[in-house]
Each structure stands twice: as C-alpha cells, then as structure tokens.
Image (cartoon, helix red, strand yellow):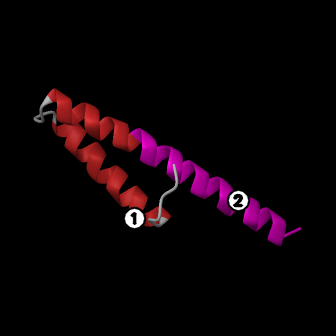
Amino acid sequence: MEDKNTFEENMTRLGKIASELEKGDIPLEKAVELYGEGVRLSAVCRKQLDEAHIKITEDNG
C-alpha cells in the first residue's frame, strides 16, 4: 500500500473521486473502481497522518 504522492495530492484525488461518485452518472463498474481507489487512498492518507503524528510526538518528547 506504498504511495509516492504527498498527503495533499492524495487528499485532492480523494476529493475528485468523491465528487465523481456523488454525481451518480457513471457506470456501476466505474463507480466500484473509483470506490476501491478511494478506500486505498483513504488508508494511505491515514498512514501518512499516523506517521506525521508519531514524528511530531517524538520531536516534542
């Protein structure tokens, strides 16, 4: 689940995915594909946030 994009890039993509899914005018297969990508990106973002939290906590002792 490694991702080379920044947190901000991943969040931007998640926003675009959410917008596409909210429109509701895409084929089911595409919606399922986008949903899967969104779930994966959500997990990546969560990991990035957890890593940032650990770094901040360690730096502040």
Q: The disc labelled 1 sits on which kind of residue?
A: Glu
Q: Residue at x 19, y 30 (%)?
A: 29
- In space, the residues marked 2 and 1 are separated at their CA atoms by 19 Å
Is 53 or 37 nearer to us in this picture?
Answer: 37
Q: Residue at x 15, y 33 (%)?
A: 24
> Mark 2 sits on what residue?
53
Residue 38 on image: x %, y %: 37, 43
> Mark 1 sits on what residue?
9
Q: Is residue 29 above or below residue 55?
A: above
Q: Quadrant of residue 8?
A: bottom left
Q: Is residue 48 above or below residue 29?
A: below
- Residue range corresponding to the magenta coloring: 39-61
Q: Looking at the image, do the residues carrying marks 2 and 1 touch, with CB atoms under 8 Å apart?
A: no
Dot label at residue 26: none
Which secondary structure lies at badge 2? helix
Which is the main secondary structure of the residues drawn in magenta?
Answer: helix
Residue 33 on image: x %, y %: 27, 37
Give the mark nearest the N terminus, 2 or 1.
Answer: 1
Left or right of 48: which side holds 56? right
Residue 46 within the segment the image draws in magenta: yes
Residue at the farthest top position: 28
